[in-house]
Amino acid sequence: MNNIKDYENLGSKRVLLRLDLNVPLKNGNIIDETRIIKIIPILEFLIKRNSKILIISHVGRPKGKFNKDLSLKPICDYLEKKIKTKVNFISEDIFKIKRNDLFKEPEEKVVFFENIRFYEEEEKNESNFSKHLASFADLFVNDAFSCSHRTHASVCKITEFLPSFAGLQFETEVNALKKVTIEIKKPITCIIGGSKISTKIDIIKNLIPKFNNIIFVGGMANNILSFKGNRIGKSISEKNCESIIKEIFEISKNTLCEITYPEDVLIGKSADDDAHIKDLKDIADDDLILDVGPKTLKRIKNIIEKSKTVLWNGPAGYFENPNFAKGSIEIAKTIIKKNKDNSIYSVVGGGDTVAVVNQLNSIKDFNFVSTAGGAFLEYLEGKELPGIKALN
Ligand code: 3PG
Ligand code: MG
């Protein structure tokens, strides 16, 4: 993997820079800026060397269609203030743009394209689309490690058309995760939550043989609860997961890995509601499971107490509403306490999980904080990520 920091004569070169500015948003406001902070160094690095920068990113999952709620404009404005450099936001149809339309003014340094996932070609890893993007630039830099599990045009295909390099943050994350997987101490506990069930459920069966405990929380747990015959009301869940979950439990029987999932929950009638504790048998059809309950939390804390390594991806509940942030906060605090007396090695990953840790002002109290969620889990699975492979 070539790194852009070793490239000489970047001056006047046009650099197509893939970033992951998929930050947690609430009502259009950025609620955690960690992913933005982490990419400031690459921007400063390129600006200092007089490169012309073309930023590509996505936010959310617009599925190939324009969606004004998923515009990158607010994120672009925010970034512009952070780097104190004028950024030219480009919302025009990308297919109508030609190389010579960009950087017409000599003082123009940074352009920022609208959400690349507004184009269906992106997720299809489409060749002509990638070629067109490549025509704007001289080099490609990927500083979005957290997208490297995606075989998408601006992550993978693009590397066939431009000399390609890893960015500063990309390399930091890969090196840190490499170290974690080599030096890991048992018992290892992996806490998996969040709402991207389809992204993660497939990965779990490969993680089982490597870990001593897998704890399901958040939206991830709902499918397990439903599989075990519980009602989950209106809670988020994924269709057609039964066979994967069956496999997960079967594989775990033949290993030392114990699987834990909620035995009680906090529900609301809507995401803005107050929290009510419920046992699983009492869940009503109009309930939304939004956090783990106190009995579950006690069990999770016990498991963390006995672990030497903990890897955590995905919040335990709908932490955006403080009434449902308790599970995530208590998990974080238990890990932090053990970290302070050096009795656990802790890695946390994912945009939302990092947001929880940040709310507690505790990034420094974990051994490693990765911006990556799905990519982090796939890396732990031990397979080569397509975005890394494309750079090699
Ligand atoms: C993430 O948040 O993990 C990355 O931005 C990738 O997002 P995705 O899961 O929607 O592909
Ligand atoms: Mg995310």
Image (cartoon, helix red, strand yellow):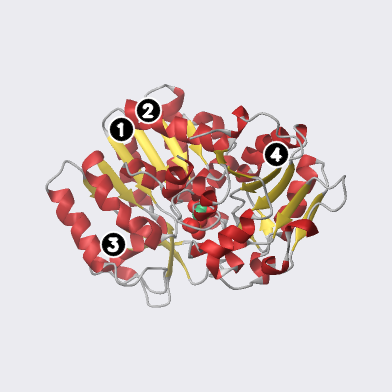
User: Element under label 1?
Assistant: loop
Q: Quadrant of residue 230?
A: bottom left
Mark 3 CB in 8 Å range of ligand 1?
A: no
Three-letter amino acid code at disc 2? Answer: Ile
- The residue drawn where x is 45% and y is 31% is 176
> How far apart are the alpha carbons under marks 1 and 3?
23 Å
User: Element under label 3?
Assistant: helix
Q: Which residue is mark 3?
A: 224
Mark 2 CB in 8 Å range of ligand 1?
A: no
Please report whichever mark, 1 or 2, sits nearer to the chain's N-terminal start.
1
Please report whichever mark, 1 or 3, sits nearer to the chain's N-terminal start.
3
> How far apart are the alpha carbons under marks 1 and 4?
39 Å
Crowd tier of the residue under label 3, counting other residues whose Cα lies within 10 Å: few below 14, some 14–19, many 20 or above? many
> How far apart are the alpha carbons under marks 2 and 3?
28 Å
Crowd tier of the residue under label 2, counting other residues whose Cα lies within 10 Å: few below 14, some 14–19, many 20 or above? many
Please report whichever mark, 2 or 4, sits nearer to the chain's N-terminal start.
4
Tell me if label 4 and label 3 are in contact, CB under 8 Å.
Answer: no
Label 2 or label 4, whichever lies nearer to me, is 4
Quarter of the figure with the C terminus: top left
Q: Nearer the viewer, residue 216 or 200?
A: 200
Crowd tier of the residue under label 1, counting other residues whose Cα lies within 10 Å: few below 14, some 14–19, many 20 or above? many
> How far apart are the alpha carbons under marks 2 and 4?
34 Å
Q: Which residue is mark 1?
A: 307
Q: Residue furthest left?
A: 254
| Label number found at residue 344 | 2
Q: Residue furthest top?
A: 341
- The residue drawn where x is 62% and y is 38% is 38
> How far apart are the alpha carbons under marks 4 and 3?
42 Å
